[in-house]
Amino acid sequence: MNNVISNICCIGAGYVGGPTMAVIADRCPHIEVNVVDINKDRINLWNSSKLENLPIYEPGLDKIIKRRRNKNLFFSTDIEKQIAKADMIFISVNTPTKTKGIGAGKASNLKWIEASARQVSLFAKGHTIVVEKSTLPVRTAEVIKEILKSKEHSLKNKEESTTFEILSNPEFLSEGSAINDLENPDRVLIGGESHQAMDALSKVYKNWVPEEKILKTNIWSSELAKLTANAFLAQRVSSINSIGALCEATGADVREVAKAIGFDSRIGSKFLDAGPGFGGSCFKKDILNLVYLSEYFGLPEVASFWNSVVTLNTWHQHRISKLITKKLFGTLSGKKIVILGFAFKSNTNDTRESAAIQICKNLIEEGAYLLIHDPQVGYKQIEQDLNLRPFNKNKNKNYSEKNNEGYWEPIDTVETNFNSADAVLILTEWEEYKKINWKNVSKVMRKPSWLFDARSIIDPNKVRNTGLNFWRIGDGI
Ligand code: UDX
Ligand code: ADP
């Protein structure tokens, strides 16, 4: 069996598939990489001549696309043809949490994985290595394997021979720094049964990743390691956010506490930033998967331990909106609040599970009028996340008529939108918000005016003597 890969197909052109394949194509010019998706609009955006129209915003991605697109990196909806040509297929489709049926609210919905496996089984030719890249519950490879094996059986005794090997190669990229994470990974994890298949994938990575960073495990360990890594990271965020609440109550400062514990080399200094609560497509989903698995295997204490990380995160988001309401005299009715940032973190246009969604919903529920800004998130996405259409100035000029009803409006620029606002709330740590001149902002706001910094990006000295009341996360001083 030949384990030299010359043609890769990736099913799913999303936040994982797109950047991962771009970096593989960039680092392996001898490999043809085809990214396919059922979503034609998304593929058109990947092929757009204007690089600012790429469907995902990720620093450094546009340069790679410019270098490799239509050379050895191709985006298409031609699923059948590209699967047939490939000797290695990555499955990188979405796996959101199930909303109904068995495991609703916890287990992942594997319908897109199953559909992809069926496509592979229908169209693949010759020996094909199938790599699961999406974040998946443990033992998903089994599902893929069963579907593919049925094809192998159906072809027995025929001349044509199609054989499959399945690998787990979880993605550890973090949005916003995905390109660097892919180019300089802490490790690459390959889980599998066949050494030949694992070596073939390892060879692809060895084009730019040092061999000692490529770890090989059995397939289930690889799947569980991915869930565990995300659960540990999310647990750190919930831990520091819980301590932040205690700091506010006791007069301590969470930044000082984080620094002090971070100096302990066993704890380490990374991932200790208190914020509005973790978001992103992975953390909550992966922990809920762990919870589901633990319950399924009769380990309720383990399930409840991990579940508390998510419970704390949700409580924390509500805590922030309640605190704002309290500071603004217990009512937000008719009050204008400028929201800075809607993405779940900076340097991405992704809003999945963003803390901003729950916090903004709560503020609107309390009657606030929100002006929402994000440099990368379009208003259509915000509308979808809030499940509420924005206020239309042209249709309804008289804001006061709607005084008791909360609503929102998107804004393109920050500088000109602070007029008569009662408060500003920072929810995403975008660089441009660090440069705002708070003295000027304070002058045009309605008094008493508040700046709420849920990301701890503002130097308190820059707000002192500006006339603004200032609150920041985890600051009890
Ligand atoms: C995460 C994992 O880091 C990555 O390895 C995995 O492959 C996918 O899930 P991502 O969700 O892109 O990546 O972002 P990450 O940087 O981990 O941040 C997740 C959330 O935690 C964000 O909302 C972020 O703002 C928050 N966070 C992170 C904090 O509030 N404080 C921190 O110190 C770090
Ligand atoms: P992730 O963050 O995991 O990359 P995304 O939702 O950004 O998730 O991307 C997943 C992509 O997978 C979407 O563009 C979706 O259209 C695509 N997809 C889902 N099912 C299939 C399928 N059966 N065949 C091809 N593409 C698919």
Image (tube, rainbow, N blue to C red):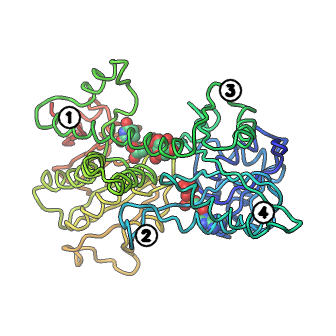
Q: Most extreme residue toward the front, as rendered?
A: 157
Q: Most extreme residue toward the right, as rendered?
A: 159
Q: Which of 4 and 364 is in front in this view?
A: 4
* Image-quarter location of ligand 1: top left
Beta carbon of the mark 1 residue lies under 8 A of ligand 1: no
Beta carbon of the mark 2 residue lies under 8 A of ligand 2: no
Q: Please name the residue shown 30% across and 47% down the image.
A: 306
| x and y percentages locating residue 448 in the rendered image | 16, 50
Label 1, label 3: how far apart the Cα atoms are: 44 Å
First of labels 2, 3 by sequence position: 3
What secondary structure is marked by label 3? Answer: helix
What secondary structure is marked by label 4? Answer: loop
29 relative to 273 in the view: left or right: right
Q: Nearer the viewer, mark 2 or mark 4?
A: 4
Label 2, label 4: how far apart the Cα atoms are: 37 Å
Residue denoted by label 2: 384
Q: Please name the residue shown 56% across and 30% down the image.
A: 186
Label 4, label 1: how far apart the Cα atoms are: 57 Å
Judge the density around disc 3: few (<14), some (14-19), many (≥20) Cα neighbours within 10 Å. some
Type of the residue with mark 1: Asp
Q: Please name the residue shown 64% across and 54% down the image.
A: 52
Residue denoted by label 4: 124
Is 429 rendered above or below residue 445? above
Label 1, label 2: how far apart the Cα atoms are: 33 Å
Q: Nearer the viewer, residue 214 or 157?
A: 157
Label 2, label 3: how far apart the Cα atoms are: 44 Å
- What quarter of the picture does the C terminus occupy? top left
Q: How many marks?
A: 4
Judge the density around disc 1: few (<14), some (14-19), many (≥20) Cα neighbours within 10 Å. many
Residue denoted by label 3: 211
Q: Please name the residue shown 77% across and 57% down the image.
A: 163
Residue denoted by label 1: 475
